[in-house]
Amino acid sequence: MKLVPADIASMLDHSTLQPYLTEDDIRRGAEVALKYHTASMCARPCDVPIMAEMLKGSGVKVCTVIGFPHGAHETAIKVTEADLALEEGCEELDMVINIGRMIRGDEDYVREEIRLICEHAHAKNAIVKVILENCYLTDEQKKRACELSEEAGANFVKTSTGYGTSGCTIDDLKLMRAAVSSKVQVKGSGGIRDLDTVLAARAAGATRCGVSATEKIMAEAEARYAAGTLEA
């Protein structure tokens, strides 16, 4: 199937989450997201006002992270963090589950926490992507986390924060795609640094990829399109 560069850009959540980034870096990140018209720009909670200002009216969604990167904040803190982000203009929330609770098997806690974030986000017409941090989970735990996310109303399930012991794998994307219905989308994140990996993720059922290498990926997409070889 032939693709155009915009098909690739529409899969990318341009991510600027590193702890050392300055305001200038965030503004530069917004310029990159605008240049390629990525699906969203995902930055740290403190950067939401900058994104909201720079991306307004562009169609590039304002996205931030909740409970990032460890997922171990108390639920009330995650909800408050989500509410503030929504008030400041966030349209997408990528929340980290309580990984320890998931490993322990406290499914009610995990489901209810996701449900609360979804309830608050959906009331503001925002979507929620649930980060599982797969590197710490067994395949059965990954499957159950996906099922709990769907039960709680999540819009996406997502592989990783990018700050665990490993990131996105194609096997995990296939497992997650099989674990949820067509109502829930799948996002890969962590270690996706080139076009071939984005295309492999797409083939495995992912509709979004969290990337910081947006410029490199889009340069590859544009070169292949020019050569007539950009295809799924």
Image: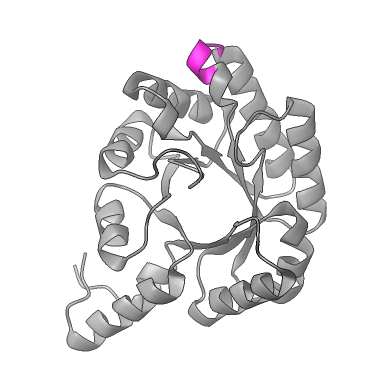
Identity of the residue drawn at 25% across and 55% down: 200
* Main secondary structure type of the part rendered in magenta: helix
Q: Is residue 228 left or right of residue 209?
A: left
Name the residue at the front extreme: 20
- Magenta highlight range: 102-106
User: Dividing the picture into quarters, in which one does residue 73 lie?
Assistant: top right
**Compared with residue 166, is residue 59 higher up or lower down, i.e. above or below?**
below
- Residue 103 is inside the magenta segment: yes
Identity of the residue drawn at 65% across and 60% down: 20
The spot of residue 19 in percent (x, y) is 65, 55
The spot of residue 223 in percent (x, y) is 27, 84
Identity of the residue drawn at 36% across and 71% down: 217
Of 35 and 7, the residue lying toward us: 35
Q: How many marks?
A: 0
Of 49 and 161, the residue lying toward us: 161
Name the residue at the bottom extreme: 226
Q: Quadrant of the N terminus?
A: bottom left
User: Dividing the picture into quarters, in which one does residue 109 lie?
Assistant: top right
Q: Is residue 23 left or right of residue 41?
A: right
The spot of residue 61 in percent (x, y) is 61, 63
Of 225 and 16, the residue lying toward us: 16
User: Dividing the picture into quarters, in which one does residue 120 lie?
Assistant: top right
Q: Is residue 140 left or right of residue 71?
A: left
**Compared with residue 67, is residue 33 higher up or lower down, i.e. above or below?**
below
- Residue 127 is inside the magenta segment: no
The spot of residue 97 in percent (x, y) is 58, 30
Q: Quadrant of the C terminus?
A: bottom left
Q: Is residue 114 left or right of residue 51?
A: left
Identity of the residue drawn at 35% across and 77% down: 5
